[in-house]
Amino acid sequence: MLDLPIYISILLLVSTILSVWLFYRAASRSNWFLLIIGLWIFLQGGLAYSGFYMDTLSFPPRFPLLIVPPLVLMIVLFSRVRGRVFIDQLDQKALTLVHVVRLPVEIMLYGLFIYKAVPELMTFEGRNPDILMGITAPIVYYFAFVKKQWSSRVILIWNILGLGLLLNIVIHALLSAPLPFQQLAFDQPNIAVIHFPFVWLPAVIVPIVLFSHLVSIRYYWRKA
């Protein structure tokens, strides 16, 4: 484990719980979702705590085990009829609020940068303006769903921009991680994502945020 102030780990824990809880609400409090995500969190947390992901030279590489299964699940849901039925039943209000989690995540990343666990380019002082999504999510929720003043087109554009910001930080995070394909930040690599409990960022939080964007883009694209 990394030697970090406790508040950074607390921010990660709060961000993970918040993302799961908000998506749980979007999924009409689905017990199946809670069961699957609970097992996934426990599995990845256990592997990371044992130091499994700290071996970055093994073949096949271990890091993809954090991100590939959620991506495969998303592809399955979007490609199957029953999956699309589930997707279309998700609550757009709760999916919009999911992005609030990006505010504590960005604060956590800045703390990790200060303690040399991620490079500056992964923070809002570097190449990562993703904090804007965490700040604007409550504003979009208020004007789109409470006041009902913003059209579907506005929410669609916001989600597309948010998806772009998410892909930006994900790409920078992957290219700066101490993995065979590292291209950035060799002086201060992204070591946090291979340590417990920060593996939950790529394994849990990012997939939930990504899936929320994709579902909303599909919904508002068809509606617009």
Image (spheres, helix red, strand yellow):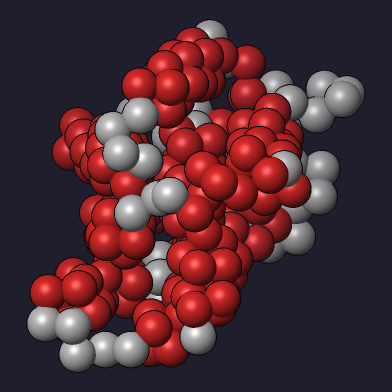
Q: Residue furthest right?
A: 59
Residue 223, above or below 172: below
Point 43% across, 22% down: residue: 32
Q: Position of residue 101 (x, y in %)?
A: 29, 54
The residue nearer to you, when weighing 163 against 114, is 163
Residue 31 placement, left or right of 45: left
Q: Residue furthest left?
A: 147
Q: Position of residue 29 (x, y in %)?
A: 28, 33
Point 12% across, 74% down: residue: 146
Asked if residue 127 shows in the view, the reply is no
Q: Position of residue 89 (x, y in %)?
A: 43, 49
The residue nearer to you, when weighing 189 against 32, is 32
Point 52% across, 14% down: residue: 43
Point 40% across, 65% down: residue: 123
Q: How many marks?
A: 0
Q: Position of residue 221 (x, y in %)?
A: 55, 78
The residue nearer to you, when weighing 131 against 177, is 131
Residue 207 placement, left or right of 13: right
Asked which quadrant contains residue 113, the reply is bottom left
Residue 126, above or below 59: below
Asked if residue 64 shows in the view, the reply is yes
Residue 107 placement, left or right of 197: left
The quadrant the N terminus occupies is top left
